[in-house]
Amino acid sequence: MSNNKDARFKTILMFGAPGSGKGTQGAILGRIPRFIHFVCGEVFRALDTRTPLGQKFVEYSMRGELVPDELTVQLWKANIDSRAESHLFKPDIDFLVLDGIPRNVEQARLMAPFIDVLHVFHLSCPDRQELHRRIRKRALKENRFDDARDETIERRIRTYEAESKPMLDFYPRERITDIDATQHPAIVFHTILSRIISLDEFKTSAEEVH
């Protein structure tokens, strides 16, 4: 793919701590035509382990090691290209809504040649007890009882603050909207959608589609 800015995917980033609701908001946005919600975790779960990339992923997993950022981005790119080739994602008219990737500054750098980040929605939830409650509720609902333990939840939040939160300094401040994630989900989504439809890129795209 060309590194030409015009060739990069028009991208919206859903960003926030575990339990902030970014997955919920991304999924709602992804139901609107011309918005493609991409969840990084789903890519790993659907990985074809027969491919060279898949085999590399398995090697790290079997050793209990973290998958390197470069390999993570390669897997993401291969999946996106596959979606484009099968016309599930149309880069010329669709907006890519990323959830769970990039996960840190290094991944953001590696992905920069491929994505034009139009806006970052930072779902903020400073109330740690509320984050714990949300994560525990979701884990129990999905029968992931180990993930509902306080020490597991606290470790996930600390990892986010150490590795992911610094990305807020990687992107231009004017492209970041901070949203109180403790508000009703409908209010959060209204804020997100209102900001998106004000973007010049969206206005241009809307005119082209119609």
Image (spheres, rainbow, N blue to C red):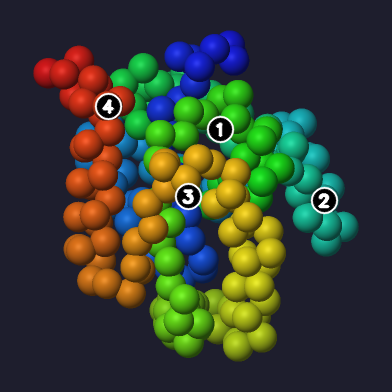
Q: Nearer the viewer, mark 3 or mark 2?
A: 3
Q: Is residue 183 left or right of residue 62?
A: left
The alpha-carbon separation of the residues under discs 4 and 3 comes to: 22 Å
Which residue type does callout 2 highlight?
Tyr
> 10 Å neighbourhood of mark 1: few (<14), some, or many (≥20)?
some
Labels 2 & 1 near each other (Cβ < 8 A): no
Q: Amino acid at mark 1?
A: Asn
Residue 10 bears which disc, if any?
none
- Mark 1 vs mark 4: which is more N-terminal? 1
Q: CA distance from mark 2 to mark 1?
A: 19 Å
Q: CA distance from mark 3 to mark 2?
A: 23 Å
Instruction: Confirm whether residue 136 shows in the render.
Output: no
Q: Which mark is residue 99?
A: 3
- Residue bearing the label numbered 1: 79
Q: Earlier in the sequence, mark 4 or mark 3?
A: 3
N-terminal of the pair, mark 2 or mark 1, is: 2
The picture places residue 26, in percent across and down from the top left corner, at 36, 51
State yes or no: discs 3 and 2 in contact (Cβ < 8 Å). no
Q: Is residue 129 above or below residue 126?
A: below
For marks 3 and 2 on the same chain, the one whose residue lies earlier in the sequence: 2
Mark 4 residue type: Asp
Q: CA distance from mark 2 to mark 4?
A: 42 Å
Q: Assign the C terminus to one quadrant of the image.
A: top left
Check disc 3 and report its element: helix, strand or loop: strand
Specify few, some or many for label 2: CA neighbours under 10 Å numbering under 14, 14-19, or 20 or more.
few
Left or right? Give the position of 165 relative to 123: right
Q: CA distance from mark 1 to mark 3?
A: 14 Å
Q: Which residue is mark 2?
A: 60
In the rendered image, the vertical position of residue 209 relative to residue 175, given as above or below: above
